[in-house]
Image (tube, rainbow, N blue to C red):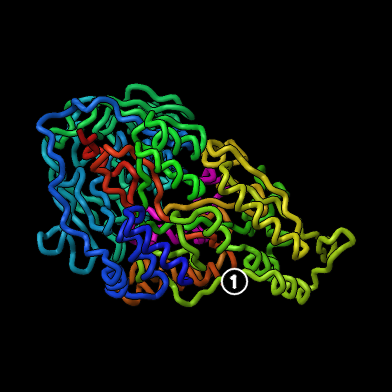
Amino acid sequence: MDHHALHELIAQVKAGRLDRRAFVQTMVGLGLTAPLAAQMLASVGVAQAQPKAPAFNPTKRGGGGLLKTLWWQAPTLLNPHFATGTKDQDASRIFYEPLAGFDPDGNIIPTLAAETPTVQNGGLARDLTWVTWRLKKGMTWHDGRPVTADDVIFTYEFVSDPATAAVTSGSYHEIAKIDKVDGLTVKVTFSKPQPFWADAFCGTRGSILPRHVFDPFRGAKSREAPANLKPVGTGPYRLLDFKPGDTVRGEANPAYHVPNRPFFDGIEMKGGGDAASAARAVLQTGEYDYAWNLQVEDDILRRLEQGGKGRVNIWPTGNPEHMQCNFSDPWTEVDGERSSAKTTHPVLSDPAVRQALNLLVDRAAVQEEIYGRGGQTSANFLNAPSRFYSKNTRWEFNVDKANQVLDAAGWKRGADGVRAKDGKRLKFVFQTSINAPRQKNQAIVKQAAAKAGIEIEIKSVVASVFFSSDPANPDTYPHFYADLQMYNTTMSAPDPQYFMNQFCSWEISQKANKWQGRNVTRFRSDEYDRTYRTADSEVDPVKRAALLIKLNDIAIANVVVIPVLWRNGVSGSSTALMGMDLTGWDSTFWRLPYWYRQA
């Protein structure tokens, strides 16, 4: 990082526009230790953060009016185990809850559980082969039925059934059995030691489902469940109305299991539009209390903040904005599907072509001209927590070198300037969702690629379609019916094991799993699969970190993905909205019961 960029980051911390933790994590990612980063801030007068004041403690439930939130990607369903995008995960979290969530520091915070299992309290095996979860007493579903251990067991059975095709199934595949200890307690036994034993039943992939509601819709019938659109959960709000692709409305749950919560009488989650209009509605006009994922040019956000009605929230995450290379053929249909795992991409199967593309992404321009405080450049797909950040990789923007790579591989320029070899031209369809920063990003890549003899056709898909969970829609990102595509993928837990299964062969997205597999590039590598399985049961934290770093390095060396930006979380909120405790490791709504409006 150059001196100008460093001084700009420090200035943002001093002005309160950048979280101190985000600065430290950025510096750690660049090779500094956390203490040195903290000393750097101290040297310019930014003191260590003081302990937080006690959280707001309302004396009664409700009374806070309506909480109005904007998600410019509108949710399409309300079952968290079918959520293919963050907007569906967040909408579901209004109504469904896991046993525990993850705070900004990655700590396990009980939600439905009475306590966090530990070796000391007898809830966790020393060898990490089992964990015991105990539910809080007296909890009920929105329909008044009691929450019991049977619901936890059922959730495992529902999600792990292959016919269900749940997107969260990977978090449960190492569970050997679940025993009911008593009406509120279950013992989860793993098939092998699980270093991240809090994967199942926690965070965005851990929401508990009511057995009495979903039991008739197991397996192949799972998509027919009315509760996929009309949730019956334990959350702080009960469903009032849901218009898929538009609006979710809820009312305060009068029997919520946390005393005096929630503060608000109701919640509205409005979907659609775009990030820029969402930013204006919170920061400029004050029509809404909260706006999610402000993927807006940073200079626009700075101007909007000057009105004083709202603030931009920035926090560290592990999320990469990245380009993907399709390892299958998106233009040939096999057994009723394109991009079939039975095919090979006719051009991107050449490593030289992928290497050239990697050299043609001007990450610095994207960061400086578009995202600003919203992220930092990185050569890695896996960036956080810092112990998993690879120092073995480097990124480079070099058009001349890209030309040299393609020349050496035999790709010759034609009369129109586009390279070809063996009758195949370097022409790609590059798709992403519609929003201004992504279209600008596409333009930057297209311009550089043209200088190397690569023709890129830009395709922009409406976000509600691109991130849809509809298995029949060919324009969703899991179908990947294009050569290249770009989006941000969420690392929704402080452990990267599940995050890195996006390149495992058994996770390939295809018709057979309703395009719910997480490996949308269709990359296959025996070395990657072996390394992943080894890391999945390695309990030595140092050895395991090395294995997970190796997974990143395999993906980067093979140019399966091209990291564009390591993104920070960026949202907008009214100046009066408090209690959010935004985290990079869980849903935006992970602490929704504790949100309140300051008088």
Disc 1 secondary structure class:
loop
Give 431 or 133, whichever is nearer the viewer. 431
Q: Quadrant of residue 461?
A: top right
Asked whether the viewer can see residue 221, the reply is no
Magenta region includes residue 429:
no
Give 141 or 577, whichever is nearer the viewer. 577
Residue at 41% x, 31% y: name it: 285
Q: Which residues are magenta?
A: 491-518
Residue at 45% x, 44% y: name it: 303
Residue at 39% x, 35% y: name it: 282
Q: Position of residue 79 (x, y in %)?
A: 38, 36
Residue 399 vs 181, above or below: the answer is below
Horizontal arrangement in the rendering, residue 526 relative to residue 399 (left or right): left
Crowdedness of circle 1 by 10 Å Cα count: few (<14), some, many (20+)? some
Magenta region includes residue 508:
yes
Q: Which residue appears farthest toward the right when viewing the image?
A: 415
**Main SS, magenta residues:** loop
Q: Position of residue 237 (x, y in %)?
A: 26, 30
Residue 245 vs 365, above or below: the answer is above
Q: Quadrant of residue 86?
A: top left
Q: Which residue is mark 1?
A: 396
Q: Position of residue 310 (x, y in %)?
A: 35, 39
Horizontal arrangement in the rendering, residue 427 relative to residue 438 (left or right): right
Asked whether the viewer can see residue 430, the reply is yes
